């Protein structure tokens, strides 16, 4: 794989157009961090969005997408959407909604036009998982350790966006998939809203508690 143009870890991702007007209402979404390795190791599945996509084109992400209307509302809807997206984007079947372990909730910054309220889940891959991409929305996949994915991002070999990088950084603290899942089962998940400060080439993303994070007039709070 050749080198790709890379997005700085604190910059908005490709296709994230900044919004100068009132905040867009976030669309409900689910993302699944598929794990393998059991008690011995920890790898995660990343899929590559088609470079032709206007939003996050070419980025390597965890499988996921928006909640469909027929999936309802609330936690159950996010779980059903996560299971469906695993099947559609990675051909992973056999995961049940109740198998998913809630890990985090990220809301796209109010300064960005296209926004999602994304619930992130963890789950171990079924033993018979036969990962394949659909070739249209997603064009490639890789099983990787979090450390290797982050290293390849720094070298310009993988295009990763801010939420993916931050989740990989969190996950990299664990030695095995089982240890990560055990940790996540005891978490109290609170929603986090990063902010984009500055504009143009100076725009950067900051998290609650980081220098420069402040609630602007008419904007949403960073942590609900």
Image (tube, rainbow, N blue to C red):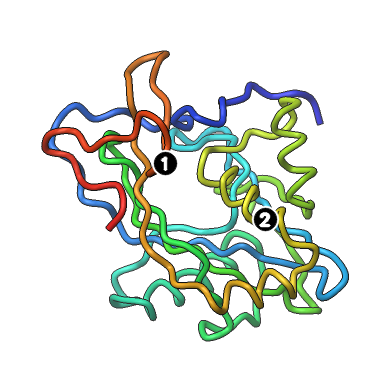
Query: Residue at the spot x=51%, y=61% of the render?
Result: 31
**Quarter occupied by residue 78:** bottom left
| Drawn side of residue 219 relative to residue 142, left or right | left
The percent coordinates of residue 37 (x first, y second) are 82, 69
Q: Residues within 10 Å of mark 2 (few under 14, many from 20)?
A: many
Query: Residue at the spot x=38%, y=64% of the render?
Result: 190
What is the residue that sits farthest to the right in this orientation?
Answer: 40
* SS of the residue under disc 1: loop
**Quarter occupied by residue 205:** top left
Nearest to the observer: residue 186 or residue 29:
186
Check disc 1 and report the residue beneath it.
207
Query: Residue at the spot x=52%, y=39% of the render?
Result: 162
The percent coordinates of residue 46 (x first, y second) are 67, 51
Quick check: 129 above or below 8? below
Query: Residue at the spot x=39%, y=42% of the render?
Result: 209
Nearest to the observer: residue 177 or residue 24:
177
The mark lying in front, picked from 2 and 1, is 1
Nearest to the observer: residue 150 or residue 94:
150
Quadrant containing the C terminus in the rendered view? bottom left
Check disc 2 and report the residue beneath it.
133
Whichever of callouts 2 and 1 sits on the residue coming sooner in the sequence is 2
Q: Count every numbered label the image shows and give the total.
A: 2
Quick check: 55 above or below 187? above
| Drawn side of residue 18 relative to residue 126, left or right | left
Quick check: 4 above or below 192? above
* SS of the residue under disc 2: loop
Label of residue 165 in the image: none
| Drawn side of residue 172 relative to residue 205, left or right | right
């Amino acid at each position: 794989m050749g080198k790709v143009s890379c997005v700085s870890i604190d910059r908005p991702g490709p296709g994230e157009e900044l919004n100068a007007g009132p905040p867009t209402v976030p669309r409900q979404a689910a993302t699944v961090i598929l794990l393998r390795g059991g008690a011995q190791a920890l790898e995660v599945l990343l899929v590559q969005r088609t470079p032709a996509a206007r939003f996050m084109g070419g980025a390597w992400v965890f499988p996921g997408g928006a909640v469909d209307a027929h999936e309802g509302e609330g936690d159950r809807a996010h779980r059903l959407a996560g299971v469906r997206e695993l099947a559609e984007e990675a051909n992973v079947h056999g995961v049940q909604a109740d198998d998913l372990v809630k890990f985090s909730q990220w809301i796209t910054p109010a300064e960005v036009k296209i926004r999602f309220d994304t619930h992130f889940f963890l789950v171990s891959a079924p033993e018979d998982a036969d990962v394949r991409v659909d070739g249209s929305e997603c064009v490639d996949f890789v099983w990787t350790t979090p450390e290797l994915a982050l290293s390849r991002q720094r070298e310009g070999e993988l295009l990763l966006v801010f939420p993916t990088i931050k989740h990989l950084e969190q996950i990299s603290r664990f030695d095995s998939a089982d240890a990560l899942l055990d940790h996540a089962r005891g978490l109290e998940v609170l929603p986090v809203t990063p902010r984009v400060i500055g504009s143009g080439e100076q725009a950067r993303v900051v998290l609650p508690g980081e220098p420069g994070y402040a609630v602007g007039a008419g904007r949403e709070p960073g942590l609900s």
